[in-house]
Amino acid sequence: MPYTVPKLTDFSKASLDAANLEVTNAVAQESEAVHSEAEWKAFRDRWMARKNGILTQLNELWLKVAPGASKREVGQRVNAIKLHVELVVEVTRCGAIFESEEAKLSADRLDVTLPGIGRPLGAEHPVVKTMNEIVGVFRNLGYSVEEGPEIETDYYNFEALNFPPNHPARDTQDTLFIAGQGSKPQRDRLLLRTHTSPVQIRSMQKMKPPVRVVCPGKVHRNDAPDATHSPIFHQVEGLAVDTNITFCDLKGTLDHAMKALFGSSVKTRFYPSFFPFTEPSADVQISCIFCGGRGVRDGAPCRNCKASGWIELLGCGMVDPNVYGFVDYDPAKVSGFAFGMGVERIAILKYGVDDIQLFFNGDVRFLEQFV
Ligand code: DAH
């Protein structure tokens, strides 16, 4: 039965004490039943609403009707009850808020013993890692890094590199051309760059000698994929132009770079070759890192160098004077060297990878071996 305020007729001390006890018991009991903010509001209004709240009723039903002799006593008691009820209501409010917060917390309680969601760390792709390593070797020698577009014009990819239109040297780089370019002059036609050498031209157009740049990047050729070929691969190009640069500088630089990349016991050999944009040109070979250059491994001919003791690794040469003509350098005043190396080829040798396709298949079991 909810508490209702009795009409007082007996104003003796014993009767007042009993009525008093009844009210305080009632407010305590009802407070126990409050567990939420909404319940608390109803509780507060029941006791304290100006219009017909229990405290108001006490005024009406007790104080107002008390005979003159009891007025003072009843007034004091009603006042005391009022302070008590206000206190209980306030304390109940804190309790209700605390309880509902606790309910919220326990609803989304975190079970710290559950196994976590592991997020594996990403890592550099072995091709990027090798490219950065190569670039790092040359940065340490004072080279800066230049980049160029992957979609190039015929002019930068071939003509300015001294491949004249229709020259057979173009056939050595099976090129992917962008379709629908037939109405443009040949030099403006777009293609996927077949090498990073066009960045040499762009760099020389941009800066005056001395120039020392490396140009890492992706290149494309119309080659069918197999264990050693991929239509997409990467190169790092190098170019140094200054006064009095000689073939000795080229040899010393590349010998140092190969030792930095493959270990100080590696030897280099320069083998005559041809590139339209260098004269003279050379292929650089390093002593076979698998058989130590002996050509024989475990009593059998070394398969990695075909028993020759040497592995061919990159192309290089002295910048052909014709190339300077395309960038307004004076060939009588400057000289320089250039080189270009395949990043996958170097990664394959460094890490003993037997199929270039592995670099592009995206198989995490392969890639995570390089972390
Ligand atoms: N661009 C040549 C290629 O892709 C590589 C190369 C050879 C670059 C000799 C050079 C160089 O800068 O001097 O086959």
Image (cartoon, grey):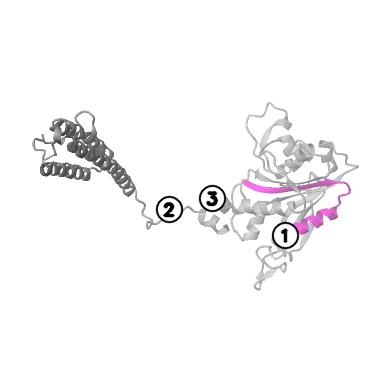
x then y, percent, for residue 41: 26, 36
Is 186 above or below relative to 113?
Answer: above
How many circles with numbers are drawn on the protein? Answer: 3
User: Of circles 1 and 3, which is in front?
Assistant: 1
How packed mark 1 is, by other alpha carbons closer than 10 Å (few <14, some 14-19, many 20 or more), is some
How packed mark 2 is, by other alpha carbons closer than 10 Å (few <14, some 14-19, many 20 or more), is few
Disc 1 marks a residue whose amino acid type is: Ala
User: Of circles 2 and 3, which is in front?
Assistant: 2
- The residue at which mark 3 appears reads as 361
Asked where in the image residue 155 lies, by quadrant, the reply is top right
Tag 3, which secondary structure? Answer: helix
CB atoms of marks 2 and 3 within 8 Å: no
Asked where in the image residue 157 lies, by quadrant, the reply is top right
Report the magenta residues as a range.
232-258
Can you name the residue that lies furthest to the bottom here?
299
How packed mark 3 is, by other alpha carbons closer than 10 Å (few <14, some 14-19, many 20 or more), is few
**Residue 244 lies in the magenta-colored region:** yes
- The residue at which mark 1 appears reads as 260
Residue sitting at x 77%, y 59%: 256
x then y, percent, for residue 90: 29, 41
- The residue at which mark 2 appears reads as 117
x then y, percent, for residue 138: 74, 52
Q: Is residue 223 left or right of residue 364?
A: right
Q: Earlier in the sequence, mark 1 or mark 2?
A: 2
Ligand 1 closer than 8 Å to the CB at disc 2?
no
